Image (spheres, grey):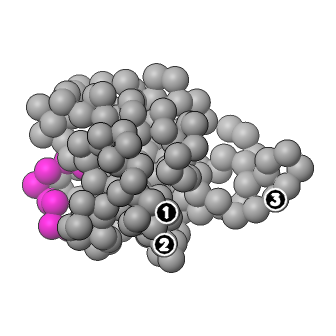
Amino acid sequence: MPKDSPMTSLKPGQIAPDFSLPAHDGQTYTLSALRGSRVVLFFYPADNTPTCTSENSQFAAAFPAFHAAGVKLLGLSRDSLQKHAKFAEKLALPFPLLTDEDGTVCSAYDVWHEKHTFGKTYMGLVRTTFLIESDGTIGAVWPVTRLAGHVDDVLTKCLNTA
C-alpha cells in the first residue's frame, strides 16, 4: 500500500465507533440507531473532485442493489452541509451525505492521516469504506487505493455475507 494511504487501525470484529452526525437531507444519523441493519459507511475526501464524484456516482448507481439487500449507504466527508446539499443534488444521490466538519468521526475511524502529493505533505481524509454489520461490529474494511471495481467489491461482499 502506498505510504500516503495508511490503513485504518480498525479491524473486522471490532465494534464500530458510534456517532451522531447531520446530513445534507436535514436529518441526523446515529449509527447505534441503525442497529438491526447493515451499513456501508464510506469516507471520501471532498465533494466535487473527480474521484469523489465518480465514487459517489458509482454508489448511487448500485444503490438499488444495496437497498434490495437491506444495506444502508452513508457517505461521509468533512465538507459542509451546504456543500454536501449542492453535491447531492447535482448527482441526484439517493443516500445521505454526513458532515464531520470537526473531524471527530474521521479520527475515531482512523481515516485522518498525513498525505503526500506532488511533494507536499498535509493532513487529509484517506478514502476508506466500512461494512458495519447489524450488530454494530465491523464486517469488512476497504482502504481504497483504486476506485475501479471498489463499489462492486463492496456490493459482492454484502450480497455474499447477508
- Estimate how packed mark 2 is, as few (under 14), some (14 to 19) or many (20 or more) residues with alpha carbons within 10 Å: some
Asked whether the beta carbons under mark 1 and mark 2 sit within 8 Å of each other, the answer is: yes
Image coordinates for residue 98, horizontal then vertical, percent: 35, 61
Above or below: residue 39 compared with residue 17: above
User: Mark 2 belongs to which amino acid?
Assistant: Glu
User: Mark 1 belongs to which amino acid?
Assistant: Asp
**Disc 1 target residue:** 79
Image coordinates for residue 80, horizontal then vertical, percent: 45, 67
- Residue sitting nearer the eye, 128 or 45: 45
Using residue 79 as the reference point, say whether residue 69 is left or right of it: left
> Is residue 32 on the magenta stretch?
yes
Q: Residue 121 shows which numbered tag?
A: 3
User: Mark 3 belongs to which amino acid?
Assistant: Thr
**Disc 2 target residue:** 101
Question: Could you tell me which secondary element the residue under label 2 belongs to?
Answer: loop
Q: Is residue 9 visible?
A: no
Q: Nearer the N terminus, badge 3 or badge 1?
A: 1
Question: Could you tell me which secondary element the residue under label 1 belongs to?
Answer: loop
Range of magenta residues: 30-40
Image coordinates for residue 135, horizontal then vertical, percent: 18, 56
Question: Could you tell me which secondary element the residue under label 3 belongs to?
Answer: strand
- Estimate how packed mark 3 is, as few (under 14), some (14 to 19) or many (20 or more) residues with alpha carbons within 10 Å: few
Q: Nearer the N terminus, badge 3 or badge 2?
A: 2
> Is residue 15 on the magenta stretch?
no
Measure the C-alpha gap from mark 3 to mark 1.
Answer: 20 Å
